[in-house]
Image (cartoon, coloured by chain):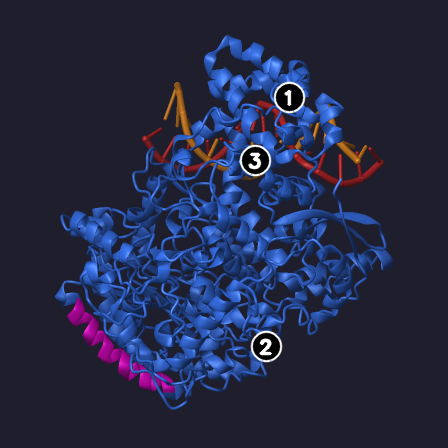
Chain colours: A blue, B red, C orange
Amino acid sequence: MLTPNKYNAVKKRWKMSSTLPESQNLRHKTQTTTSNHKGNVFAEPQALTTTPRKASTQGTVLTEIQSNMGPLTTPTKGKETGAGEPWTPTSNLKMLISAASPEIRNREKELCMDPEGGDAMDPELGEEGEKQISRKEKSLGLLCHKFLARYPDYPNPALNNDISLDDVASELNVERRRIYDIMNVLESLHIVSRLAKNRYTWHGRANLPQTLAKLRQVGEEHRYGQQMQQIRQRSLEKELDSDGEEKENGEVEGGEQGQKEMFFVELPGVEFKAASVNSRKDKSLRVMSQKFVMLFLVSTPRVVSLEVAARILIGEDQVADQDKSKFKTKVRRLYDIANVLRSLKLIEKVHVTEERGRKPAFEWTGPEDIPNVKETTATTATAKRTLESRASVDNCAKNLFSSPGSKRSFTRHPSLIKLAKSIQEDRRKINSAPTSPVKNDSSSIEFFPTKMAQLAAICKIQLDQQSNKVVDRTPKPAVAVTEAVPDHQQKAAENPGAPQPPVLTPTEPRASTVHLTPRAQFTPQPTGAMSFHPAQCSPLIPVLLPQLQGGGPYAIYMHHSSFRPHPLTRPQPTSLAVRSMTFEDKTGRSPSDVTVHGHSPATNKLPTSSPSALKRVCSEIPSRESPSKAKRIDPSTRDTSPKLCEILQARLKARRGGLLSNRPSPRALHLDPEFVNTPGSSVAAAANQTLEQNLETLLEKEEKVATSDSEAGLTPVRAVPLTPQHLNTETLIPTGYLIPISQQSLFSYKDLHSTESSKASTPTYNIYHTPTAGSRPPPIQEFTPTSLSLHRPPPASPFSAPGHRFHSPSPAILNFTLQNLGLIPGPGSVPACSPGTAQTPEHPSSVPLPPHLGLHQKGSMVFVKPMSPVPGQHQMTGPGGQPLTLISLQQVTTPKGTALTQHSFFHTPVSLSPLATVVTTSHGHTAPAGAKTVYIPQRKLEVTTEDT
DNA sequence: ATCTCCCGCCACGCT
DNA sequence: AGCGTGGCGGGAGAT
């Protein structure tokens, strides 16, 4: 029994202490409660530096933990721990063990330290059986607590936030395997990101708001809410009737269900790393975790039962109820995830009592006021899929609308394919790379394999040629879109956003608006906001975002994650980028929920109290103000946080050596066919032809410009239009990546879309080139934060002033501008390129921001979203333009005060505790919400918090 | 009996 | 061959 393990010594050690059954028990028992005393012995090098570990001072930690834990449910043993007691019997055991080796000793000490602090919850356990305790002590949740205790919620970027798996494992005395579980979940929330083998970077909760917003958006896109209801309904029916009808399944139309599986939502700052997900695809824990969180964010009563979650995650719809084994496995995993989430205080265990009986469920206790995606940052959430994972693709295709034809024939330019492959390779390398050098800011810039560069260059050329053609085409798609519209509406229902279709009539042209909100600066001013209508820009619009931390701007690809046949969704050109954005308003509403979130309609409404709300407001405002034109912002003007500038400069210097190598990331190259489908696209569809035409014109112009730019030295990025036909199906490309791109790069994109064809299906693929191979180091200049503010056309143009068109139609331009702008966020108008200038005084950033703010600020992000028909109203609807909104947030440095901020952050979120009760009540309501498709007769659910 | 979920085997992909 | 990862499910503790 013991362990034949392969594992390394560590494990063994571990096992020694923990695993061995018998011995363990004893030990554990002793430990059980405790172990804490010493605590601090080991400080991680990393963690230590930055933050005072919580662990070290248990007090803080404990408090936090307790608070956390308490609610959480997990019964941790905690009291004792709380006590932080020094030695427990277990400790003795450990001692003995440790005696054997010093290392062990150390580990033990460490273990003791942290863990306990938090837990302390259950007196009972602790006392009782050690064994029990032991088991509990070993729980993932506790382990996660310990882990979390070591790092500040809001790490100081300046410090080293690297996490070494080995170190952690040894310090916490756990097997690596367990650490992986935790890291995967944390990574899914972007609390950490993988740098390289054995190395992760700690981001803390800084990205959380963005991540949650993104997840919510994606969840809405996938209509998880509906799915949940369906499942519930179904189950009820079955129970009651015995018949489960499955019709519901079908309802979803899109068959979205299946699709979801593989994507992983990334955040701007974190993307790569995340991307690193290597081999295992994104199948698992990471994705599962995200989906799980999405369910909470989307469901009205923020309660999700394990059963429902498991079903959705399995995608069972397709197959009615799959094996039980599968279900069981899923449930196991969910528990693993839930334990980590509990440690994060994001969820709490509760029980839902239905007619049948009581079922385990979890309630969301995280922040309630999740900023809209847009605002938050646009994180472009991107779901990325690995190209490889065809399976996912297949699923998508299946699920996707029936999009008939196109199954996956994904036509891509050969060169693109190559690129994709190469990219993948790169990723792998990155991932696997034993030591990934890159880290923090600088990391954003990656070295790009020369190969990639070459390919890229080739592709560009080819694409460019094509692109020209494409441009012309663009209009068509738009048309198609319009046509589609009607249908969309129906489908729209499906979409989360859809519900409000009436509001936005697809027919209306929406103005796309770009909002830039420089978080850092806070300037409420609209300065940041920019809107432009990209007419039919290629579906994919790469957006460049400057990030502070990341240093580089990111290009965001929207993945259309789902293929949901959204009525709306059409393959519009712009759609891609947009997609994520689209929902924002919609997002608010969960499918069923009309009731749920106020947002949807109200979304725009200002969030009252929550800081997030403020953010939103700010972002919104700007957007409104600067309508379309803003986009044209001077390239020169950019604001970036000073830091960014600096970073950039540094990078530039560094890079200048090799242009090619510089390529921000291989990923930039990715093309996702999927994007096409994105719901956003549907929105895009709405855009009027006229606009399109205009846009086209603009685009052409822009292209020229772009070229010039490129000539200038910048490599323009282009979007290559793919053949439309295939679009639908192909989901090959991992969507949703954010790619850091050198700012300089421009995009010229083109659309090819044929388009007219089917609405949703219309497949236009756009491919973007990443900035060609040699992305250059962006000139620092651009970044200067300050400059932008002025430039922005404060345009008064209200969002959608119908009349206005965007001057800068072409996506390329947008990108370009975005880059600049995004960076720009700073109110300061100084365009100064010089980095130095960049650091504008303006940024209040220095000022301690409220924690939440800090979060937002973090990265400047740009979202491009097509407005969903509904919500978008205010925002955009330009006459013809598609509604796009870009939001850029700058990152300011994350607020340093980690500790404080932390608290605030979580606290801010509405106190959920009461939620449970609320939930129950609300619960009933929610059900109905799903109006359209499903109504689920819901039974009331009672939620009981479990606490022990 | 059911809920939880720890443990670690073992596969996968990279070095 | 070895290593880092992490999917997966047996089986046992907790309820």
- Residue A733: give x, y in percent of width and height: 41, 57
Is residue A562 depicted above or below A156 in this figure?
below
The magenta segment is A691-709
Circles 3, 1 touching at the beta carbon (< 8 Å):
no
State left or right for residue A579 relative to residue A691.
Answer: right
Which residue carries the number 1 mark?
A: A31
Q: Residues within 10 Å of mark 3 (few under 14, many from 20)?
A: some
Residue A696 inside the magenta-drawn segment: yes
In terms of sequence position, does the residue under pointer 3 or pointer 1 come before the other?
1
Helix, strand or loop status at disc 2: helix
Residue at x 55%, y 57% (from the top left corner)? A259
Identified by mark 2, the residue type is Pro
User: Where A493 sits versus A457, above or below?
Assistant: below
The front one of A234 and A198 is A198
* Element under disc 3: helix
Indicate left or right for A99 with A629 as reference: right
- Quarter placement of the N terminus of chain A: top right
Residue type of the residue flagged with mark 1: Gln
- Which residue occupies 67% across, 30% down? A136
Residue at (24, 46) in percent of width and height: A449
Report the front residue among A259 and A209. A209
Of all chains, the one bearing label 1 is: A
Q: Residue furthest bottom?
A: A803
What is the distance, in whole Å, between disc 1 and disc 2 at their CAs? Answer: 53 Å
Comes first in the chain, label 1 or label 2: 1
- Name the residue that disc number 3 marks: A59
Provide residue A419's location: percent of width, then percent of height. Answer: 30, 53
Quick one: label 2, few (<14), some, or many (20+) residues within 10 Å? many
Residue A456 at x, y percent in the picture: 24, 56
Q: Earlier in the sequence, mark 3 or mark 2?
A: 3
| Residue identifier under label 2 | A601
